[in-house]
Amino acid sequence: MLINQVGSINVAGVGQNDVTASSVLINQAGSLNLSIVSQFDVTASTDFINQTGTMNQATISQFFDVKESNILINQAGVMNDALVIQESGTRLSSVAINQAGSMNMADITQTTTTLSNASTTQIGSNNMHATTQTGIRQTAIVVQIGNGNMGAISQ
C-alpha cells in the first residue's frame, strides 16, 4: 500500500489484520500531518513512514503474534513525534527511527517480544527518545548527535 501526501493537516491511516508479506509506505511533506498504522497478527511485514516538515506525528502499533516485522520511520524537521508499539508475541522484528532537526521525540516500546531490535538516531538539538523493552534477547541502540539531547533505555 502506498500513500503520498503533500501539504498540511493530512491524515494517513492503515489497519491490517491477519496478513502475510504486507508492505506499507507512507510519504508526507508539510506540517501537522498524521500517519497511523495498526497491525494485528501480521507475518513478514514492512512498514515505512517518511515525513518532512513541522509538527508531524507517526504512530505504528503491532499486536498479537507479529513475526518478522521491519519498521522504519524517517522524520526531518522540527517538533516531530514518532511512536512505535510492539506487544504480545512479537518476534524477530526490527524498529528504526531516524530524526533530523530539533525538538523531536522518538518512543519505542517492545513488550513481551523475542529477538527484537530497536534503533534510534537523532541529529540536531533538544531531541528526546525513550526505548522500553521487555522479553527475551532484545537489542537497543541509540545515537544522538547535537546539543541538549535526552534519552532513556529501559530493558
Image (cartoon, grey):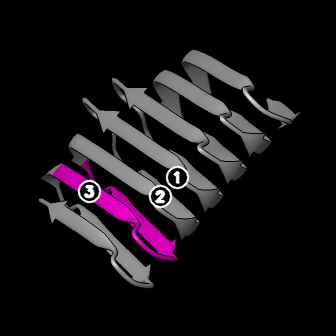
Other residues around mark 2 within 10 Å, as few (<14) / some (14–19) / many (≥20): many
Q: Is residue 123 left or right of residue 83?
A: right
In this rendering, does residue 44 appear at all?
Answer: no
Determine the residue positioned at 43% across, 30% down. 61
Residue type marked 3: Thr
Q: Is residue 140 left or right of residue 106?
A: left
Report the residue at 19% width, 52% height from top: 133
**The C terminus appears in which quarter of the rendering?**
bottom left
In the image, is residue 37 above or below residue 26? above
Q: Which mark is residue 104?
A: 2
Per the image, the residue denoted by label 3 is 131
Crowding at mark 1 (Cα within 10 Å: few <14, some 14-19, many 20+): some
Q: Position of residue 106 (x, y in %)?
A: 41, 54
Q: Which residues are magenta?
A: 114-133
Closer-to-camera residue (52/90): 52
Q: Which of the two discs, 3 and 1, labels the residue nearer the N terminus? A: 1
Label 2 and label 3: CA atoms lie apart by 14 Å
Amino acid type, label 1: Met
Image coords of residue 115 (percent x, y)? 29, 57
Q: Please name the residue that numbered disc 1 is placed on.
A: 79
Which callout, 3 or 1, points to the residue nearer the camera? 1
2 or 3: mark nearer the eye:
2
For mark 3, give the secondary structure: strand
